[in-house]
Amino acid sequence: MKAAVKQVLSHFLKPAAANHALPGGAKLRKLLSMALVTVVTAVLFGCATPPLNTNEVSVQLTPEQILSEPDEAKGTVIWGGVIVSSTNLVDRTQFEVLAYPLDSRQRPLTHRKSLGRFLLQSPDYIETQNYSPGRELTAIGTLQGVTKGEIGEASYVYPTVTINDVHLWHPDNSHEKPRFIFGIGLNIGG
């Protein structure tokens, strides 16, 4: 693979004199070089590493499946979704999360059908202002069974997970944008 990439790069990056037989050879070489850099950059950004290590995940169940088979609520899962509420209680911090399937980078696919709700709990204090309603998160945690609760006035049974690791997604996807800018301009005033 490396040899093939080297061969392609060496062909496109030859000195301009080597391309004199082609009309506009230098321009073509420059255009192809820019296209190659664009493709390589796109491939590198497309191969981003997911934020959480899934080695400890032992159960491939969704919150919906836990509701239909509560006795199966054992093991470690990776679930994600949108925070509905976050509360600091006397002995823990608790998040109510509307679950969604995850993409290959472990980000919730909020345009897809939800998978129900679950409670995500931590024995530690977590600043709920940072984990406010509407924010997306992905968590790896240990299933703790189910907890009876309410949504409005309706009874609801929540699959409950204790946090092992959690990733809070940036609301504006700023972490996914390139950290460099090409351009010509004048910056006045810092």
Image: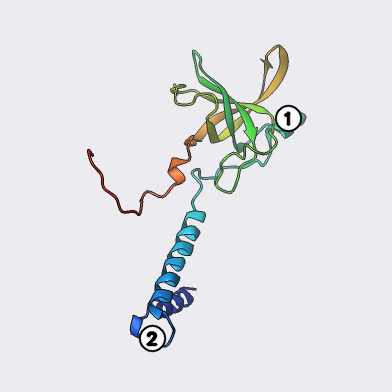
Quarter occupied by residue 27: bottom left
Callout 1: few (<14), some (14-19), or many (20+) C-alpha neighbours within 10 Å? few
Residue type, numbered disc 2: His
What amino acid is found at the position of numbered circle 1 in the picture? Answer: Asp
Q: Which mark is residue 20?
A: 2
In this view, which residue lies farthest toward the front? 23
Q: Residue placed at 35% from the left, 54% from the top?
A: 182
Name the foreground residue: 138 vs 11: 11
Q: Nearer the viewer, residue 107 or 40?
A: 40
Q: How was the colour assigned to the protein in this rendering? A: rainbow
Q: Quadrant of the C terminus?
A: top left
Q: Which of the marked residues, 2 or 1, is nearer the chain's N terminus?
A: 2
Which residue lies at the image location 36% right of the left edge and 51% below the top edge?
A: 181
- Disc 1 designates what residue? 71
Residue at 45% over, 23% down: 124
Q: Residue at x 43, y 70 (%)?
A: 31
Q: Secondary structure at mark 1?
A: helix
Judge the density around disc 2: few (<14), some (14-19), many (≥20) Cα neighbours within 10 Å: few
Q: Residue 25, how many percent across, how many down?
A: 41, 80
Kindly indicate whether the residue at mark 1 contacts the one at mark 2 (C-beta within 8 angstroms).
no
Q: Quadrant of residue 136?
A: top right
Q: Position of residue 163 (x, y in %)?
A: 53, 31
- Residue lying at the far left of the rendered structure: 189
